[in-house]
Image: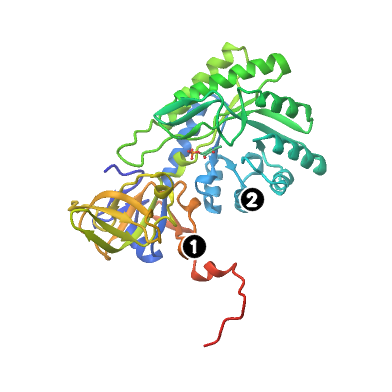
Amino acid sequence: MQFHGTAKTNKLGHLEIGGVDTVQLAEKYGTPLYIYDVALIRDRARAFKRTFENAGITAQVAYASKAFSTVAMVQLAAEEHLSLDVVSGGELYTALTAGFPMEKIHFHGNNKSYEELVMAIEHNIGCIVVDNFYELEMLKEVCKEKNKTTKILLRVTPGIEAHTHDYILTGQEDSKFGFDLQNGQADEAMRLALEANLMEVLGLHCHIGSQIFETTGFILATQKIFEKLQQWKKDMSFESTVLNLGGGFGIRYTDEDDPIPAAQYVEEIIAEVKKQASLYSMKLPEIWIEPGRSLVGDAGTTLYRIGSSKDIPNVRKYVAIDGGMSDNIRPALYQAKYEAVLANRVLDQPEETVSIAGKCCESGDMLIWDLPLPKSGSQDVLAVFCTGAYGYSMSNNYNRIPRPAVVFLEDSKETLIVRRETYEDMVKLDLPLKEKVKS
Ligand SMILES: Cc1ncc(COP(=O)(O)O)c(C=O)c1O
């Protein structure tokens, strides 16, 4: 198995990440525990940024904080000079709490509330990615009421759906997001946005999918967008100063995944934007991207303690861990696949094939099917790799299971960045019907 970042086996045969023994972490902080290889997050961020810098392109690399949003993570994004994509008042509040520069925040979402828009405008955030006509109207009202202007991008759906190695040309896209580029909606939205002199239209945004392993989808989207831009240049004298091509860059979860390096995505995107701009004699726009998973996904690992097992002869052996769909819903939600090792016995050879079951009251709560593993028991710690994106951020309290703690690891140092939820936390919002019955 290929380890990511600073992960390695130490002298004790334990999994070590960021110079810290993960078995000791499991003992100290309990399990389940999310741990992050901070150096790897920095590497990933720098790879995207460096490629733009080397090409001399004005760019913004915005961390899509939906992948993993906590105050410390947002501060790390700021340290790496990233911009930030938020999709809710909660993510924006996290950024505010973290002291993230407001002018580098882009606000997404297909149903932003009035209150969320007020919050964004009051804090002078960098740009609002307008998704639909309802929002466009509401944003005009908010700007008038607050006597402020704002920068916007219009989110468009270019009729390309990209997923891993496939992309589909859908013509008119059946998506809940954005203005359709083909059916006239995007034209109408641009006209309305330009008329409303409370908004500075920077340009267009599109996001074509996730876990994408090649660049064809981005190239096609760029072409479709430029076709439209040249029409708008003629019809509305509009020239885009920004083109945001979203996120979706793939990562390696298992041996089945074969992503290309960050630099290759960026270089090919830059080449196409340059080509299109020159084809239509347009100024080269700034290029913005929004990686989420590819910045934090493979930097995250979850540690679990192994508990019960159930051997069904000639069928399968289930091995249960002390977490599951409450801390990682991706396998149940979309059959996501993961690799794992015993953190305390990395070098031991696999002796059996087991399926890793979560502890939630749901048959679908299976973390990994058919994993080769040494014979294991309650003395063992299972490390599941690549859980850094959409793990903690999609975690939940199903079965009233408290959310795990999160620890950052770097230069042989550990930093607790989210404390473990307690049972008190589980009931802290509950209001009783009666005083507790005294026994
Ligand atoms: C608009 C937008 N930008 C960026 C992202 C980040 O995608 P990924 O984590 O796959 O890079 C998403 C993910 O849903 C998205 O919807």
Lower sequence index among marks 1 and 2: 2
Between residues 25 and 154, which one lies in front from this camera angle?
154
With 256 as the anchor, is 119 left or right in this view? right
The residue depicted at 50 percent of the width and 21 percent of the height is 220
Q: State the quadrant of the N terminus.
A: top left
Q: Is residue 409 visible?
A: no
Residue 71, placed above or below residue 56 = below
Mark 1 touching mark 2, by CB under 8 A? no
Q: Amino acid at mark 2?
A: Leu
Q: Amino acid at mark 1?
A: Arg
Q: Which x, y percent locates residue 271? A: 49, 19
| Mark 2 CB lies closer than 8 A to ligand 1 | no
Tell me the residue that label 1 is attached to: 419
Tell me the residue that label 2 is attached to: 96
Image quadrant assignment for residue 101? top right
Image quadrant assignment for residue 21? bottom left
Residue most extreme to the bottom: 439
- Callout 2 environment at 10 Å: few (<14), some (14 to 19), or many (20+)? some
